[in-house]
Image (spheres, helix red, strand yellow):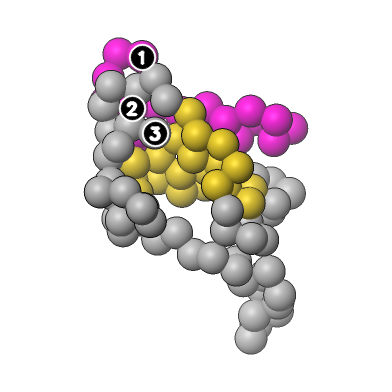
Amino acid sequence: GPPGPRGRREPVRRIPYGQDIAGTEAYCTKVTRSSDERLLATGGTDQIVRLWDERTGSVLATGMGHSGTVTDVAFTCDNKQVLSTALDSA
């Protein structure tokens, strides 16, 4: 997004920790930004990992497979993959 008042880049869309994920009954438990600041990855109580376009705020992909709340998400160094952990055995 555009620079903020202190020269920092401000995201166009904010996905706050602990808030509901639009269109679901889930809460966001983890948010992380890719190192190139183009993507966001979120995980939540709905057991789904979502990949977001930082600029537009649109969901680019969803990943399912966990049977418990997502507790962490991280991008690989090249930003080509998202890793996640959850309160399950997946």
Image height of 26 relative to 12, above or below: above
Residue drawn at the location 26% of the way across and 27% of the way down: 68
Give the residue at mark 3. Answer: 48
Give the residue at mark 1. Answer: 90
Residue drawn at the location 60% of the way across and 42% of the way down: 60
Of the pair 48 and 84, the residue shown nearer to us:
48
Neighbourhood count class around disc 2 (C-alpha, 10 Å): few under 14, some 14–19, many 20 upward: many
| Residue furthest front as drawn | 23
Does the image show residue 33? Answer: no
- Element type at marker 3? loop
- Element type at marker 1? loop
Give the image location of residue 62, x and y in percent: 50, 34
Give the residue at mark 2. Answer: 86
Give the image location of residue 15, x and y in percent: 45, 59
Q: Which of marks 1 and 3 is nearer the N terminus?
A: 3
- Element type at marker 2? strand
* Callout 1–callout 2 Cβ contact below 8 Å: yes
